[in-house]
Every structure is written in structure tokens, then in C-alpha cells.
Amino acid sequence: MPQTFSERLRQPGLVIAPGVYDLVSAKLADRAGFDALYMTGFGVVASHLGYPDAGLATYSDMVGRVRQIAEGTTTPLIADGDTGYGGLLNVDHTVRGYEASGAQAIQLEDQEFPKKCGHTPRRRVIPLEDAARKIKVAAQARSSAGFKIIARTDARTVHGLDEALRRGEAFLKAGADILFIEAPESLEEMERIGRTFDVPLLANMVEGGRTPILGRAELERLGYKIAIYPVAGLLAAASALQSVYAQLKATGSTQDWDGELYPFGEFTRMIGFERVWEFERAHAEEEA
């Protein structure tokens, strides 16, 4: 049996979780041997709906993708649960649904609805007391302590780091297992977060975002336990798609494209065609 996310957290070393947003990205990351996968809300909303990550996705949109990714992979899945998609009863429903769908951790944030991507402007947070109640409900809703509650605060950008740290303390008291202080803007701020908390901390490494991109050793030195890279795969895929489509439009062929294509035969095996072929052979023999 694969190691669970809860088991991995008890072991030394940084957990690196690439962002996955569909079954192709998830299967490729699964095969790469990471300790965890991170279902990115930004990426799911963009790829599944073609919308910005601005509170437009529903619980049904997201829990369906959680189930698909969890069923199609073996690596422990951390899933973005946004604000819980409503009030306290919605949070209860969301946690139960994500856990039943195969996620091993859910990320919940304290933004007002409609929420926004954590590295974009004009985000607002709900009152601390209301946010802490959501975390308390989430911790009570799960059926197993092995299902982890990641409490995220977006207070840093508008209210400053002191308020973000205050919220982190309140979320821990409410039952959070992991803290996610979103969008610190300097190495000094990240150091202060690491000094303040003696619990698993999550660092959000967004290329082009507000937070410095750091390496494994530096994040471990600062006290972080988990590093998510939510958009690295999505941005790399978008760049490759734009390049090959431009070549095709300009020349009418991909023959001279200087990018790299994933081997077609390997892709068919990765996506599961070998089982289809085995099934067809078995049934063809029975019919004969």
C-alpha cells in the first residue's frame, strides 16, 4: 500500500507537491514519484471551466475533479476546497465530500465570497471568529484524523503579517493540522512565520507570484514542511501548447517544431490503453 499523507508528515524532510488540474497532469505527476499531489483550484477552474479563479467554480465542479484525480492516481492528494463553498453547513458538506472522494487533505481559506486567487489583488477576508468556526466545523466533520485540515489565511496582503499570524494561532486552536499563511512577500516574512509556529507549515511557490521561490534546503531551514507548486505544470503546458499551435498555424505542419513532444506510444500506455487492448484480446479469444 502507498504511504499516506498523514504518515509522510511524520517523517523528516520537505513534502513537495506539484499542482495537478486534470487527469493527464495528475497521471504524469503520479508516475514521477512525488510524496503528494496538490489539486489546484486555479488550474482546475482554468482547465475545466475556462474561467479565472474568482469564486465561479461550485462544490460540484470541484468535488467531481477530486474524485477523478483520486481514483486515477495512487499518490496522496491534497485538494483545494476554497472557502468551503458557503457557510458552516457547506463547509461540513465539503469536508465530508472531499474525504469520501479520496482526498487525504483539504485546504480551506478565510476569504470573503467570491474568493480570488491568493496572488492576485483585492482579496478580502471574513472576520476571524467566523473563519475559526469554519475550521472547527471542518475538523469535526472529517471521519478520520488522518484526513488533514489545511487552514489558509489571506490576511497578509490587506491586513499585514501580524494579523495573518494571529489568525494562524486561532486556526490551530480551532483544530487545523497544517497552516498556510498565504503570500508572504519576503524571505524575512517567511522566516518569521517559521519562528512563530511549531506545526507543519505550507509554502505556496507560485512562479510570478508575491512570494519568493525558494529551494528545498532553504524552505526546510525556514521551518516549512510542505511546498506546493500549483501552477508550474499548468504554465509549462500552456507555453508548450501556444508554441506548437503557433507553429502549426504558421506553417501548416508540426514537422519543424523545435519543442519536445511526449512520445505517442508512451502516452497511450500512460493513459491506460494497454488495459483496453488486453480486454479486447481476452474477449476476442472468448468469442472465437
Image (cartoon, grey):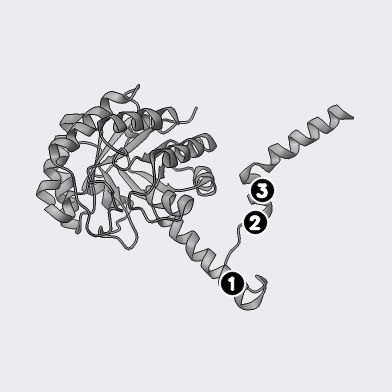
- How crowded pointer 2 is (Cα within 10 Å; few <14, some 14-19, many 20+) is rated as few
Marks 3 and 1, how far apart in space?
23 Å
Residue type, label 1: Asp
Residue type, label 2: Pro
Q: Nearer the viewer, residue 184 or 96?
A: 96
User: If the image is split into quadrants, where does the C terminus sit?
Assistant: top right
Report the disc number at residue 130: none
Q: Is residue 15 left or right of residue 151?
A: right
**Residue 262 point in image, percent of width and height:** 61, 57
Is residue 239 at least partly visible in the picture? yes
**Residue 52 point in image, percent of width and height:** 38, 56
Quarter residue 79 falls in:
top left
Contact check, label 2 and label 3, Cβ < 8 Å: no
- How crowded pointer 3 is (Cα within 10 Å; few <14, some 14-19, many 20+) is rated as few
N-terminal label among 3 and 1: 1
Residue type, label 3: Thr
N-terminal label among 1 and 2: 1
**Residue 47 point in image, percent of width and height:** 47, 53
Q: Nearer the viewer, residue 124 or 270?
A: 124
Name the residue carrying label 1.
Answer: 258
Q: Is residue 34 left or right of residue 164?
A: right
Marks 1 and 2, how far apart in space?
15 Å
**Residue 234 point in image, percent of width and height:** 45, 56
Instruction: Kindly report which numbered mark, 2 or 3, lies closer to the viewer in this rendering.
Output: 3
Report the disc number at residue 268: 3
SS label for mark 1:
loop
Name the residue carrying label 2.
Answer: 263
